Amino acid sequence: MVTLFDSLSQQKKELVPIAPPRVSIYSCGPTVYARQHLGNMRPYVFADVLKRTLRLFGHEPRHVINITDVGHLTDDADQGDDKMELSAQQSGRRAEDIAAHFTELFQRDLALLSVQPPEVWAYASAHVPEQIAMVEKLEARGLTYATPDGVYFDTSRAERYGRFRAAAAATEVQERLVGAGAKRNDADFALWKLSPRESRRQMEWPSPWGVGFPGWHIECSAMASHHLGAQLDIHTGGVDHIPVHHENELAQSEHALGVRPWVRYWMHSEWVVLNSEKISKSRGGAPNLDDVRERGIAPLAYRLLLLGARYRQRIDLSWQSLAAAQRALTRIGQALQGAPREPPDADEPRWVAFRAALADDLDTPRALAILHESRRDARLLRAMTDALGLGAAVHALDEQGDAALAPLLAEREDARRAGDFATADRLRDAIRRAGFEIRDTPAGARLVRGAK
């Protein structure tokens, strides 16, 4: 039996899928106007652990992650410019090219973190007809009104609007409700925004209300129902989605689709903080996986660090904690050398305890503790690392050293050829801190395990 914490009811509940063994999962994806930082990646590592756990217990997850490539304003409460359009204006590039570039980087980072791809990548710009159709349903039910700048959802006419407010308070997430223009209520939100008459946007579409673009919240409701049906088993995201985005998704979806509950289990991962402050693009200095690799730390060390805390627990990140996670990952890799890929006995006590930890709302710290206790049993350790998504990186450690260090090795060779020996020495030291030495061979420099 798998139990999960539902953010809406604030209760741990047994998982009872709508149509077993299938479990539908929708995860709010990134707005691809910039590089995703380390904090942005946590919800996807958490969702990946969820999927792996479900498979461990015989479920068949069908997972959708959206890519917001249009419609997300610089203020979540419908103020400011579209983030994609603003990025295009500032860089002089096409919005579509920016979206494609940062989507590719995001998907590459997921692979480096051993996050399995979803069954469906849902792009907001490719689902505009579905979004228009959902707005029309809400309009027919008398839940919308028009203003000079768009079509809005009237929260005063929505039954049970505001149910996530208690959850937001419980997680210390601050609400961001802003009065705007002709909005009737501060909590009302845009379903469709009209393009300014005096200018033309790069990304806009015709609609019954005029040329414009969809609101941020309607995107997820339309894409989730299109790919997974009217009712979802699980919806995941970060805690910052709770007070505005998920509140609005919930209201518009239940009224448009006529099903309650729209989502059976809402699951949210906590923030990652750096020096006790939330990591944020707007504040600058937000590290990403490239920064991790430049310090000689494997991306999978970050995954291991995340697994060391419950997904609902805030993590205070530091380079020291990442370095410690790298050392722990190296020890696991050394213990796994030559381990057979054979399933453990179902009644093996440590395997039973490991599975029980994951079944208890993804208790990864307890699961990791059992994993470390099992390091002398290579077969059991292999199964546990695979279940936690650490297996692929550990295999890479076994076979060819840490693949994350390959870019550093290439940069060092470039620096040596250019005569920049200070840079070459700095990169060599970073590689040594990660536990590897550089050996020159007829085929070129390669990494070998050996440094402490």
Image: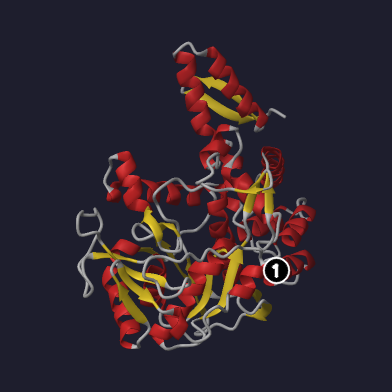
Q: Judge left or right: residue 354 versus residue 208.
A: right
Q: Is residue 339 visible?
A: no
Which residue does the image show at 45% across and 20% down from the upper left? Answer: 414
Question: Which x, y percent locates residue 69?
Answer: 35, 57
- Quarter of the image for residue 386 reads bottom right
Pointer 1: what residue? 355
Which residue does the image show at 65% across and 55% down from the upper left? Answer: 385
Quick one: which residue is furthest to the top in this view? Answer: 419
Question: Which x, y percent locates residue 136?
Answer: 29, 81
Question: Which x, y percent locates residue 62?
Answer: 46, 72
- Comparing 161 with 6, the one in front is 161
Q: Is residue 367 above or below residue 405?
A: below
SS class, disc 1: helix
Q: Residues within 10 Å of mark 1 (few under 14, many from 20)?
A: many
Which residue does the image show at 54% across and 13% down from the upper left? Answer: 421
Amino acid type indicated by mark 1: Arg
